[in-house]
Image: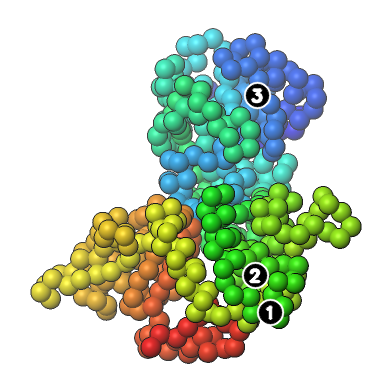
Amino acid sequence: MKRLHQSSSGSTSATTSVRLASSKEDQAWFDAQLDSFHDLGATSPIGDFLRQIVEIDSKPVALLAWGPACYALKDRDRWISWSAPQRVARLKLIVQNRRLLILSPKGASPNLASQAMGAALRALPAQWLEVFGYQPLLAESFTDPEGYAGTTYKATNWQLLGTTQGYARSRLDFYVPNESPKRLWCLELHPKARGILRSQVLPDSYAKALSTVPQGLLPLSTGQFETLRKAFAAVPDPRRKAGNHQFSIGMVLSLVAMALLSGRREIAEISRFAQSLSQDQRKRLGLPYSRTSTKCRRVPGYSVIYQILRRVDPAELNRVLNDWLTAHASQLPQALALDGKMVRDHFGVLSLARHGDGAPEAMALYDQKEGTERSEQQAATELLDSMGSLDGKVITADALHCQRKIARTIAEKGGDYLLQVKGNQPYLEKQALKKASAPGTPFLKQAK
């Protein structure tokens, strides 16, 4: 066992230290104590997992177990305000306090629990770095409101974020009710923890904690996907002898749509996305079997995708796609319009409103379009900063809001944006016009 942190406990001149239960003997003793004296018993060491032993003058007084964070927590994720892809990739930067056990009779040492928790938290980042190669940014934990008030967490500056809905994760993406809601507590282990977690680019020092975002995920439900595949099958195939090709135009356009909705933008990225699809997903696309096996299905390569996108009739594709979008409008990601209106040149009202019915999601006041501390641009930035996650939402705005800071804020919160480009951004306008007029670009068209 290695001592990693020491501190004076105050006027008693006792020394508080925190070490890891790293040997098999220490771990067996640690788990035995939890089994014997903790209400929940020992906890399984899944993923990155640490056992801390807090000692005063070399005598064990408290045990803390730390492990992986919950996959998704509504209140925590809203508090961080990160996007779903950021959460999946950066979840290891949150650690969960799984157990806290005080090794003394209740009431014998009134402040011992908070003293032990404080010492453990101070030692945790360095210990985690030494064992796993990165420092966590945030800690989370739960208390049962029926039996515990969370006094220890309050005394050590944890924030109470809310109460869980009483579900437990029994296997991947499947939750069952356990009729036992818990209070959720979170604590920033770094003064800028939440800002780092939701930042567009994660600092290199945390790169070792990154998890690969799952590839090959189809972003539509089975029913939506099937109707889209049938719609794309009606688009005229621009290739010669269209019926003789191994990959029909409906297959290829469906695959392209899935890739675009999953964030791929270049044909090479779309091709790699196709390769990442599982056999079941390839079956749903109707892709053909391999020539040598009836268990493996092939995907179109770069050249097939390129030829179809380059030669497909954009007007016909737009018609089919727009008909499908209209039919499924209520089931697709929500579109919000960011727009401001001046009231008799005295003040302006900026709203973030739903496209369908105009109902506002958020509002702010301003005094001028631009150029002041209370301008519409500044109000838009502050309004978006105050929003929670924008997952599944598309923000539209006119050219006034075609600003780098606004676009970055939307992207960092997990949303997409569609911003009008005019002469106030001459370089961007030039690049957009150049892109729109390029051959083989059926998805861009210059407005008349």
Q: Indicate the amino acid at tag 2.
A: Ile
Residue 356 disc label: none
The residue depicted at 62 percent of the width and 23 percent of the height is 63
Confirm whether residue 85 shows in the render.
Answer: no
Label 1 – label 3 distance at C-alpha: 60 Å
Which image quadrant is residue 6 in?
A: top right
Indicate whether 407 appears above or below 192. Answer: below
Label 1 – label 2 distance at C-alpha: 9 Å
Upstream in sequence: badge 1 or badge 3? 3
Taking the view exactly as shown, the residue that stands out farthest to the right is 292
Which image quarter is the N terminus in?
top right
Q: Indicate the amino acid at tag 1.
A: Arg
Residue neighbourhood size for the residue with mark 1, other residues' Cα within 10 Å, grouped as few (<14), some (14–19), many (≥20):
some
The residue depicted at 27 percent of the width and 79 percent of the height is 371
User: Residue 423 at x, y = what percent?
Assistant: 37, 88
Name the mark nearer the viewer: 2 or 3.
2
Name the mark nearer the viewer: 1 or 3.
1
Residue 43 disc label: 3
User: Residue 296 at x, y = what percent?
Assistant: 81, 53
Which one is in front, 409 or 291? 291
Q: Secondary structure at mark 3?
A: loop
Visual colour scheme: rainbow
Q: Secondary structure at mark 1?
A: loop
Q: Secondary structure at mark 2?
A: helix
Which one is in front, 221 or 364? 221
Label 2 – label 3 distance at C-alpha: 52 Å
The residue depicted at 75 percent of the width and 33 percent of the height is 2
User: Residue 243 at x, y = what percent?
Assistant: 70, 71
Instruction: Check whether the beta carbons of the residues at disc 1 and disc 2 lie within 8 A of each other.
Output: yes
Residue under pointer 2:
249
Residue under pointer 1:
239
The residue depicted at 46 percent of the width and 60 percent of the height is 415
